[in-house]
Image (spheres, rainbow, N blue to C red):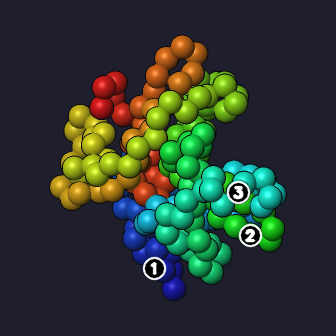
Amino acid sequence: MRWLVPLVLFLALPLVACGDGALTPSGTPAGKASLVFDGASYGSMGSRPLGSLSASEVESVGSGETQGSTADVFRLRSGGKEWEVLTRSGGRWLTWEPLALEEARRQLSDSLGVPEAQVSVEKVERVEWPDACLGAAGDHEVCAQVITPGFRVVLGARGGEYLYHSDLQGNVRRAADGG
């Protein structure tokens, strides 16, 4: 029995030592709804009454999985943000954004010491990264050479633009300028 604790510590050490902290998994906070649409994870941002949008203002873009059930997914035809999607639930439209955007906004807010409300979203686009490091590997970092779908997120704060790369689950890396 005396060997059990050292064995567990020995086996756990590689798990702790292998992480460099560059990828930050974005879980959905307790009590916050989640949606998986087109392979990407989304977090709920708010809602509005169903009557606030007419059928002509939204277009169906497929279906997603939310809290164990299937939901029809929509986008605004005009005036909406291209990265946001909508679902209907309990007489309301729920608005969703990629978890990658939420995590990138949080990271930038923390690094600059500004409220998230002062971080603007300039662009969010779906991309395929050339490797598991999301096209943002460090100088001495070895990355699996596998196509990794995700998002390129451009945020603005304090007069500058900041680029983030992510996978579809919300793991985010700050990219070098121009990446």
* 3D distance between C-alphas at marks 2 and 1: 54 Å
> Which mark is first along the chain, 3 or 1?
1
> Which mark is first along the chain, 1 or 2?
1
* Tally of numbered tags: 3
Q: Of all residues shown, which one is farthest toward the left? A: 145
In front: 53, or 123? 53
Does residue 166 sit above or below 44 in this rendering? above
Does residue 179 sit above or below 54 in this rendering? above
Is 149 situated left or right of 29 in this image? left
Give the image location of residue 26, x and y in percent. 55, 54
- Residue at the spot x=55%, y=59% of the render? 59
Is 117 situated left or right of 48 in this image? left
- The kind of secondary structure element at disc 1 is loop
Give the image location of residue 7, x and y in percent. 42, 75
Circles 1 and 3, Cβ within 8 Å, touching? The answer is no
Please give the residue where the numbered disc 3 appears in the rendered image: 54
Please give the residue where the numbered disc 2 appears in the rendered image: 89
Disc 2 residue type (three-letter): Ser
In front: 179, or 18? 179
Any part of residue 130 in sight: yes
> Which mark is first along the chain, 3 or 2?
3
- The kind of secondary structure element at disc 2 is strand
* 3D distance between C-alphas at marks 2 and 3: 15 Å
Mark 1 Cα-neighbour bin, 10 Å: few <14, some 14–19, many ≥20: few
Please give the residue where the numbered disc 1 appears in the rendered image: 3
